[in-house]
Amino acid sequence: AVVSTQSTGDYSSNCKIYDPEVPDDPYHNVWDKMDWFVIFHLTGWWAKAIVFRDYWMSFVLSITFEILEYSLEHQLPNFGECWWDHWILDAVICNGLGIWLGIKTLDVLESKTYDWRDLWSIPGNRGKFQRVLSQFTPHSWTKFDWGYTEDVKRWFAVVGICTAIMTFELNSFYIKAVLWIPPPHIVNYSRALVILFLGAVSMREQYEYMSNPLCKRFGQQSWVAICILVTECMIVYKFGYETISKPFPPHVIAFWVAFVVIFLSWSLWNFTYKLPRRRRTTSGREVSESVDEGDIRAQRRLKSQ
Protein backbone atom coordinates (compact mmCIF):
# COMPACT_ATOMS: atom_id res chain seq x y z
CA ALA A 1 0.00 0.00 0.00
CA VAL A 2 1.13 3.52 -0.74
CA VAL A 3 -0.03 6.51 1.26
CA SER A 4 -1.12 9.46 -0.82
CA THR A 5 1.23 12.43 -0.85
CA GLN A 6 -1.58 14.84 -1.65
CA SER A 7 -1.29 18.18 0.06
CA THR A 8 -3.15 18.47 3.34
CA GLY A 9 -1.59 21.71 4.48
CA ASP A 10 1.85 22.53 5.89
CA TYR A 11 1.48 23.13 9.63
CA SER A 12 4.93 22.42 11.07
CA SER A 13 7.59 23.78 8.71
CA ASN A 14 7.87 27.17 10.41
CA CYS A 15 6.75 27.46 14.04
CA LYS A 16 7.72 31.06 14.75
CA ILE A 17 4.78 33.01 16.11
CA TYR A 18 6.57 36.27 15.38
CA ASP A 19 8.82 36.20 12.30
CA PRO A 20 11.11 39.26 12.18
CA GLU A 21 12.37 38.20 8.77
CA VAL A 22 9.02 39.27 7.30
CA PRO A 23 8.51 42.81 8.67
CA ASP A 24 5.45 43.47 6.50
CA ASP A 25 3.57 40.56 8.08
CA PRO A 26 5.52 39.13 11.05
CA TYR A 27 2.55 37.01 12.18
CA HIS A 28 2.12 35.33 8.82
CA ASN A 29 2.67 31.87 10.33
CA VAL A 30 -0.36 32.34 12.55
CA TRP A 31 -2.55 33.64 9.73
CA ASP A 32 -1.43 30.77 7.47
CA LYS A 33 -2.82 28.27 10.01
CA MET A 34 -6.22 29.98 10.04
CA ASP A 35 -7.78 27.89 7.27
CA TRP A 36 -11.13 26.12 6.92
CA PHE A 37 -10.04 23.48 9.42
CA VAL A 38 -10.46 26.08 12.19
CA ILE A 39 -14.21 26.32 11.51
CA PHE A 40 -14.52 22.53 11.33
CA HIS A 41 -12.62 22.12 14.60
CA LEU A 42 -14.88 24.57 16.41
CA THR A 43 -18.21 23.34 15.03
CA GLY A 44 -17.08 19.72 15.37
CA TRP A 45 -16.35 20.01 19.09
CA TRP A 46 -19.53 22.01 19.62
CA ALA A 47 -21.49 19.07 18.18
CA LYS A 48 -19.43 16.50 20.11
CA ALA A 49 -20.06 18.28 23.41
CA ILE A 50 -23.79 18.08 22.70
CA VAL A 51 -23.49 14.38 21.87
CA PHE A 52 -21.37 13.55 24.96
CA ARG A 53 -23.37 15.91 27.22
CA ASP A 54 -20.42 16.08 29.60
CA TYR A 55 -17.74 18.76 29.93
CA TRP A 56 -14.98 16.58 31.35
CA MET A 57 -15.39 13.80 28.81
CA SER A 58 -15.23 16.35 25.98
CA PHE A 59 -12.18 18.05 27.51
CA VAL A 60 -10.29 14.79 28.08
CA LEU A 61 -11.04 13.58 24.54
CA SER A 62 -9.83 16.89 23.12
CA ILE A 63 -6.50 16.69 24.95
CA THR A 64 -6.14 12.99 24.16
CA PHE A 65 -6.51 13.58 20.43
CA GLU A 66 -3.77 16.22 20.48
CA ILE A 67 -1.48 13.71 22.22
CA LEU A 68 -2.41 11.07 19.63
CA GLU A 69 -1.42 13.49 16.87
CA TYR A 70 1.99 13.85 18.51
CA SER A 71 2.28 10.06 18.79
CA LEU A 72 1.29 9.29 15.19
CA GLU A 73 2.92 12.06 13.19
CA HIS A 74 5.61 9.61 12.09
CA GLN A 75 2.86 7.70 10.23
CA LEU A 76 0.80 10.61 8.89
CA PRO A 77 2.81 13.77 8.21
CA ASN A 78 -0.27 16.02 8.41
CA PHE A 79 -0.46 15.22 12.16
CA GLY A 80 2.70 17.28 12.55
CA GLU A 81 1.86 20.74 13.90
CA CYS A 82 3.60 23.50 15.82
CA TRP A 83 3.28 23.38 19.60
CA TRP A 84 1.13 26.50 19.67
CA ASP A 85 -1.04 25.09 16.89
CA HIS A 86 -1.66 21.97 19.00
CA TRP A 87 -2.28 23.57 22.37
CA ILE A 88 -3.37 27.16 21.73
CA LEU A 89 -5.14 27.23 18.38
CA ASP A 90 -6.60 23.70 18.55
CA ALA A 91 -6.98 22.67 22.21
CA VAL A 92 -7.75 26.05 23.77
CA ILE A 93 -9.37 28.21 21.08
CA CYS A 94 -11.09 25.85 18.63
CA ASN A 95 -11.78 22.79 20.78
CA GLY A 96 -12.19 24.70 24.04
CA LEU A 97 -14.52 27.32 22.58
CA GLY A 98 -16.51 24.65 20.74
CA ILE A 99 -16.91 22.60 23.94
CA TRP A 100 -17.95 25.71 25.91
CA LEU A 101 -20.56 26.60 23.31
CA GLY A 102 -21.79 23.01 23.32
CA ILE A 103 -22.20 23.02 27.12
CA LYS A 104 -24.06 26.35 26.94
CA THR A 105 -26.33 24.84 24.30
CA LEU A 106 -27.00 21.95 26.69
CA ASP A 107 -27.92 24.43 29.42
CA VAL A 108 -30.46 26.02 27.09
CA LEU A 109 -31.94 22.65 26.11
CA GLU A 110 -32.13 21.47 29.74
CA SER A 111 -33.93 24.63 30.90
CA LYS A 112 -36.16 24.85 27.84
CA THR A 113 -39.81 25.70 28.44
CA TYR A 114 -42.66 24.85 26.07
CA ASP A 115 -45.40 27.16 24.88
CA TRP A 116 -48.38 25.09 23.77
CA ARG A 117 -50.39 28.04 22.48
CA ASP A 118 -51.40 28.28 18.85
CA LEU A 119 -48.81 30.02 16.69
CA TRP A 120 -51.13 32.87 15.73
CA SER A 121 -52.10 33.53 19.36
CA ILE A 122 -48.49 34.36 20.29
CA PRO A 123 -48.05 38.15 20.29
CA GLY A 124 -45.36 39.76 18.14
CA ASN A 125 -43.36 38.50 15.18
CA ARG A 126 -40.39 37.71 17.39
CA GLY A 127 -42.47 35.35 19.55
CA LYS A 128 -43.85 33.63 16.45
CA PHE A 129 -40.34 33.25 15.02
CA GLN A 130 -39.04 31.71 18.27
CA ARG A 131 -42.02 29.35 18.31
CA VAL A 132 -41.20 28.18 14.76
CA LEU A 133 -37.53 27.62 15.66
CA SER A 134 -38.52 25.60 18.73
CA GLN A 135 -40.13 23.05 16.41
CA PHE A 136 -36.62 21.97 15.39
CA THR A 137 -35.37 21.40 18.95
CA PRO A 138 -35.80 18.16 20.96
CA HIS A 139 -39.15 17.54 22.63
CA SER A 140 -37.34 16.38 25.77
CA TRP A 141 -33.74 16.30 26.95
CA THR A 142 -31.92 13.93 29.30
CA LYS A 143 -28.88 15.16 31.18
CA PHE A 144 -26.00 12.65 31.23
CA ASP A 145 -24.25 11.81 34.49
CA TRP A 146 -21.72 9.20 33.44
CA GLY A 147 -20.51 8.51 37.00
CA TYR A 148 -17.01 7.61 35.83
CA THR A 149 -15.69 6.57 39.24
CA GLU A 150 -18.81 5.09 40.85
CA ASP A 151 -17.66 1.55 40.19
CA VAL A 152 -15.04 -0.25 38.17
CA LYS A 153 -17.49 -1.46 35.49
CA ARG A 154 -18.68 2.07 34.68
CA TRP A 155 -15.08 3.30 34.71
CA PHE A 156 -13.85 0.82 32.11
CA ALA A 157 -17.09 1.13 30.13
CA VAL A 158 -16.52 4.88 29.77
CA VAL A 159 -12.87 4.24 28.88
CA GLY A 160 -14.04 1.82 26.19
CA ILE A 161 -16.46 4.40 24.80
CA CYS A 162 -13.71 7.03 24.71
CA THR A 163 -11.38 4.56 22.95
CA ALA A 164 -14.01 3.90 20.28
CA ILE A 165 -14.55 7.64 19.79
CA MET A 166 -10.82 8.28 19.38
CA THR A 167 -10.59 5.40 16.88
CA PHE A 168 -13.38 6.97 14.82
CA GLU A 169 -11.47 10.27 14.91
CA LEU A 170 -8.22 8.67 13.77
CA ASN A 171 -9.95 6.66 11.06
CA SER A 172 -11.13 9.85 9.41
CA PHE A 173 -7.47 10.77 8.79
CA TYR A 174 -6.16 7.30 7.98
CA ILE A 175 -8.95 6.53 5.51
CA LYS A 176 -8.28 9.78 3.66
CA ALA A 177 -4.61 8.85 3.43
CA VAL A 178 -4.80 5.19 2.43
CA LEU A 179 -7.68 5.65 -0.03
CA TRP A 180 -6.28 8.90 -1.47
CA ILE A 181 -9.40 10.92 -0.72
CA PRO A 182 -8.80 14.69 -0.99
CA PRO A 183 -9.64 16.59 2.26
CA PRO A 184 -12.45 18.70 0.72
CA HIS A 185 -14.15 15.69 -0.91
CA ILE A 186 -17.87 15.18 -0.29
CA VAL A 187 -17.16 11.67 1.06
CA ASN A 188 -15.39 13.16 4.09
CA TYR A 189 -18.30 15.50 4.87
CA SER A 190 -20.86 12.74 4.39
CA ARG A 191 -18.99 10.35 6.66
CA ALA A 192 -18.66 13.02 9.37
CA LEU A 193 -22.41 13.72 9.33
CA VAL A 194 -23.33 10.03 9.38
CA ILE A 195 -20.98 9.33 12.30
CA LEU A 196 -22.25 12.41 14.15
CA PHE A 197 -25.94 11.48 13.98
CA LEU A 198 -25.26 7.79 14.50
CA GLY A 199 -23.03 8.64 17.46
CA ALA A 200 -25.71 10.82 19.04
CA VAL A 201 -28.19 7.94 19.05
CA SER A 202 -25.67 5.29 20.11
CA MET A 203 -24.35 7.44 22.97
CA ARG A 204 -27.89 7.80 24.28
CA GLU A 205 -28.33 4.03 24.03
CA GLN A 206 -25.06 3.33 25.81
CA TYR A 207 -25.93 5.73 28.62
CA GLU A 208 -29.34 4.09 29.02
CA TYR A 209 -27.73 0.63 29.07
CA MET A 210 -25.24 1.71 31.75
CA SER A 211 -27.66 3.69 33.92
CA ASN A 212 -31.01 1.91 33.68
CA PRO A 213 -31.09 -1.49 35.48
CA LEU A 214 -34.20 -2.40 33.49
CA CYS A 215 -32.32 -2.05 30.19
CA LYS A 216 -30.89 -5.49 29.41
CA ARG A 217 -29.92 -5.07 25.74
CA PHE A 218 -27.29 -3.10 23.90
CA GLY A 219 -28.92 -0.62 21.51
CA GLN A 220 -29.25 -1.40 17.80
CA GLN A 221 -27.48 1.79 16.69
CA SER A 222 -24.61 0.99 19.05
CA TRP A 223 -24.13 -2.33 17.27
CA VAL A 224 -24.25 -0.54 13.92
CA ALA A 225 -21.59 1.91 15.15
CA ILE A 226 -19.37 -0.98 16.28
CA CYS A 227 -19.74 -2.68 12.87
CA ILE A 228 -18.81 0.55 11.06
CA LEU A 229 -15.80 1.02 13.34
CA VAL A 230 -14.56 -2.53 12.75
CA THR A 231 -15.07 -2.20 8.98
CA GLU A 232 -13.11 1.06 8.85
CA CYS A 233 -10.27 -0.47 10.85
CA MET A 234 -10.17 -3.42 8.45
CA ILE A 235 -9.99 -1.03 5.47
CA VAL A 236 -7.11 0.87 7.07
CA TYR A 237 -5.33 -2.41 7.86
CA LYS A 238 -5.80 -3.80 4.34
CA PHE A 239 -4.81 -0.73 2.35
CA GLY A 240 -2.52 1.02 4.81
CA TYR A 241 -0.60 -1.75 6.56
CA GLU A 242 2.75 -0.25 5.54
CA THR A 243 1.67 2.99 7.19
CA ILE A 244 0.26 1.70 10.48
CA SER A 245 3.14 -0.80 10.87
CA LYS A 246 5.81 1.91 10.96
CA PRO A 247 7.65 1.49 14.28
CA PHE A 248 6.96 4.03 17.01
CA PRO A 249 9.80 6.27 18.17
CA PRO A 250 11.28 5.30 21.57
CA HIS A 251 9.98 8.42 23.34
CA VAL A 252 6.42 7.69 22.16
CA ILE A 253 6.65 4.10 23.45
CA ALA A 254 8.04 5.34 26.78
CA PHE A 255 5.22 7.86 27.14
CA TRP A 256 2.40 5.35 26.50
CA VAL A 257 3.97 2.69 28.72
CA ALA A 258 4.16 5.25 31.54
CA PHE A 259 0.58 6.33 30.82
CA VAL A 260 -0.76 2.76 30.97
CA VAL A 261 1.12 2.07 34.22
CA ILE A 262 -0.20 5.27 35.85
CA PHE A 263 -3.73 4.63 34.55
CA LEU A 264 -3.87 1.05 35.86
CA SER A 265 -2.24 2.03 39.15
CA TRP A 266 -4.76 4.82 39.74
CA SER A 267 -7.65 2.54 38.82
CA LEU A 268 -6.41 -0.12 41.24
CA TRP A 269 -5.94 2.43 44.05
CA ASN A 270 -9.28 4.14 43.48
CA PHE A 271 -11.46 1.03 43.31
CA THR A 272 -9.69 -1.12 45.92
CA TYR A 273 -8.80 1.52 48.53
CA LYS A 274 -10.23 5.01 48.10
CA LEU A 275 -13.79 4.19 46.99
CA PRO A 276 -14.44 1.35 49.52
CA ARG A 277 -13.04 3.52 52.33
CA ARG A 278 -15.26 6.42 51.34
CA ARG A 279 -18.31 4.14 51.24
CA ARG A 280 -17.51 2.74 54.69
CA THR A 281 -17.14 6.26 56.07
CA THR A 282 -20.43 7.34 54.50
CA SER A 283 -22.31 4.28 55.77
CA GLY A 284 -20.82 4.73 59.26
CA ARG A 285 -21.89 8.37 59.30
CA GLU A 286 -25.40 7.37 58.25
CA VAL A 287 -25.58 4.78 61.06
CA SER A 288 -24.31 7.32 63.59
CA GLU A 289 -26.86 9.89 62.45
CA SER A 290 -29.69 7.34 62.68
CA VAL A 291 -28.58 6.39 66.25
CA ASP A 292 -28.46 10.06 67.27
CA GLU A 293 -31.94 10.62 65.87
CA GLY A 294 -33.19 7.57 67.78
CA ASP A 295 -31.70 8.91 71.06
CA ILE A 296 -33.36 12.28 70.50
CA ARG A 297 -36.74 10.66 69.92
CA ALA A 298 -36.33 8.51 73.06
CA GLN A 299 -35.46 11.56 75.15
CA ARG A 300 -38.52 13.36 73.85
CA ARG A 301 -40.74 10.42 74.80
CA LEU A 302 -39.30 10.38 78.35
CA LYS A 303 -39.90 14.11 78.76
CA SER A 304 -43.47 13.78 77.58
CA GLN A 305 -44.09 11.08 80.16
Image: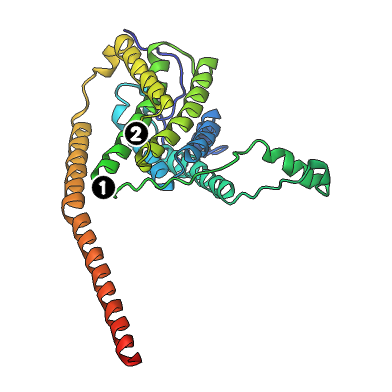
Q: Pick out the residue farthest to the top.
A: 1
Quadrant of res 300: bottom left
What residue do we see at 29% from left, 24% from top?
Answer: 74
Where residue 137 appears, x then y in whole percent?
62, 38
Going by the numbered disc 2, the residue's amino acid type is Lys
Q: Quadrant of the N terminus?
A: top left
Which residue has dot 2 on it? Answer: 216
Helix, strand or loop status at disc 2: loop
Q: How many marks?
A: 2
Q: Is residue 9 visible?
A: yes
| The quarter of the displayed image where residue 2 is located | top left
Q: Is residue 181 above or below residue 229?
A: above
Depth check, front residue: 194 or 151: 151
**Which residue has dot 1 on it?**
151
Label 1, residues with CA under 10 Å away: few <14, some 14-19, many ≥20 = few
| Screen quadrant of the C terminus | bottom left
Q: Secondary structure at mark 1?
A: loop
Q: Residue at x 32, y 32 (%)?
A: 163
Q: Using residue 39 as the reference point, say whether residue 69 is left or right of it.
A: left
Q: Position of residue 156 (x, y in %)?
A: 26, 39
Q: Nearer the viewer, residue 51 or 170?
A: 51
Can you name the residue that lies furthest to the front here?
305
Q: Residues within 10 Å of mark 2 (few under 14, many from 20)?
A: few
Given the image, on which type of amino acid does mark 1 rest? Asp
Q: Which mark is residue 296?
A: none
Picture quadrant of residue 261: top left
Residue 22 in view: no
The residues bearing labels 1 and 2 have C-alpha atoms spaced at a distance of: 18 Å
Residue lying at 24% horizontally and 44% vertically, measured from the top left: 152
Using the image, determine if residue 40 lies above or below residue 282.
above
Q: Which marked residue is nearer to the observer: mark 1 or mark 2?
A: 2
